[in-house]
Amino acid sequence: MATMRVGFCCVFLMLVAVRRMPSATAGGWPPPNYADALTKCLLFYEGQRSGKLPPTQRLTWRKDSALTDGQEGGVDLVGGYYDAGDNVKFGFPMAFTGTVLAWSIIEFSAELGPELVHAHEALRWLTDYLLKATAQPNRIFVQVGDPYSDHNCWERPDDMDTPRPVYQVNQTHPGSEVAGETAAALAAASIVFKSSDPAYAATLLSRAQADELVWGAAWLNRATSSTRYQCHIIHGIKQMELEENGSDLEFGWDAKNAGNYLLLFLQQKYGRLVEEFACAMMPQSHSNYIKYTPGGLIYATPGCNMQDVTGFSFLLLLYARYLTSARRTLTCGTSQYPPSALIDVARSQVNYILGQNPLNMSYMVGYGTKFPQKIHHRGSTLPSMDQHPQHLFCGDGTPYFNSNASNPNLLVGAVVGGPNDGTDNFVDSRYWPNQTEPTTYVNAPLVGLLAYFSKN
């Protein structure tokens, strides 16, 4: 059984001045259908499922896959999600997806309406897997599959034949970051299921309490309604400020300072740091650091830029809701912003994703009339087993990858990486994964955003 030492480094953003964002109603665009986008956003998770699919599976071109995962390590690791367009199960981004998906449900359960049941299903598919991954004391199974062999093959998850080694972190091979994220996901999910399934929620919370760290401790504080983990939080925040010079413009699976500050602020801590984050996001603020494309999209990374777009927008919306309830405004130097200004920024980003952009293109697959057709995703690219029941081996998928044809299977609700070079340019090509690969952690905060905007 393989082991892996986890130590992810945070990449600092180059912070530059912003341009004025265009009006969300400019260009004659029709109003977005947020409710339809929400339905599709959650449907996407069914396309990312690993394991034995349930009879309620709606994306029927997907089939059972990876039914022997974990055998190499003598454990059952069947289930969970493929986090992106490959067939490896990475525990760190999967756990982050669970934390933020749970956060979306906690904050916007009323606005989710009939989609709440699908949100619960999406979350439970993930937490069931995390319970398997944490079943043994003092160890967490954090990855299934070899990324090198997997990335050298373009094959369906349904019949993949690449090695499925099992990686773990434990007392001799520590991985505090992934352990803290796993604790956060389980703790946050315990809040979601506390009323509908208290026994399951208690199991999640009990498992979460096996770890600490800032993100995990903050969620444990909230889930337990206690300050038991406060010392870990205070120490961790001080370390982040020392090591990262106070930079709080990070919120993703591998760096979540801004999320830490907001979550702790909602528990009456670290208000100044949250204000700094919000001011950095506001166009025309003298404190702005974030860059926007000419068409109005947040630009923060040449990687999967939509992770920052949806994550930052989610945090802005939550902070705006707090300011509204507290009858406060955001102060950025000599400028004052009402909560509605923060909400407008978040709405503009969601609207951009849904087609209000210079290319008049939705970056959510299956939403609108124009959306990416050649996404970097194995299952979507290759013919389904209904159409091609014969086994497709490692090299058999290459002609499909190289084809100029649109993907045969629609991964409805998948949000791709989108423009990522500071412009509004987008190349719809499988050769450009930073722009065309979808991920579970991009959709997780978008669930909350779409739920809110569908009702407001």
Image (cartoon, grey):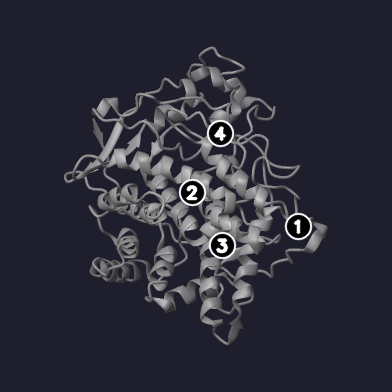
The 10 Å Cα crowd at callout 1, few under 14, some 14 to 19, many 20 or more, is few
Q: What's the residue type where badge 3 is placed? A: Ser
Separation of marks 4 and 2 at Cα, in angstroms: 15 Å
Residue 170 in the image: state x and y as whole percent. Answer: 20, 44
Q: What's the residue type where badge 2 is placed? A: Tyr
Q: Are marks 2 and 3 in contact (CB under 8 Å)?
A: no
Disc on the earlier residue, 2 or 3: 3
The 10 Å Cα crowd at callout 2, few under 14, some 14 to 19, many 20 or more, is many
Q: Which mark is residue 441?
A: 2
| Quadrant in which the C terminus appears | bottom right
Disc on the earlier residue, 4 or 1: 1
Disc on the earlier residue, 4 or 2: 4
Residue 84 in the image: state x and y as whole percent. Answer: 50, 39
Q: Are marks 4 and 2 in contact (CB under 8 Å)?
A: no
Separation of marks 2 and 3 at Cα, in angstroms: 14 Å
Residue 179 in the image: state x and y as whole percent. Answer: 29, 50
Look at mark 1 in the image and give the residue it sits on: 31
Q: What's the residue type where badge 1 is placed? A: Pro
Separation of marks 4 and 3 at Cα, in angstroms: 25 Å
Which numbered disc, 4 or 3, marks the residue closer to the eye? 3
Q: Quadrant of residue 291?
A: bottom right
- Residue at image position (70%, 27%) is 405
Q: Residue furthest right?
A: 28
Look at mark 4 in the image and give the residue it sits on: 377
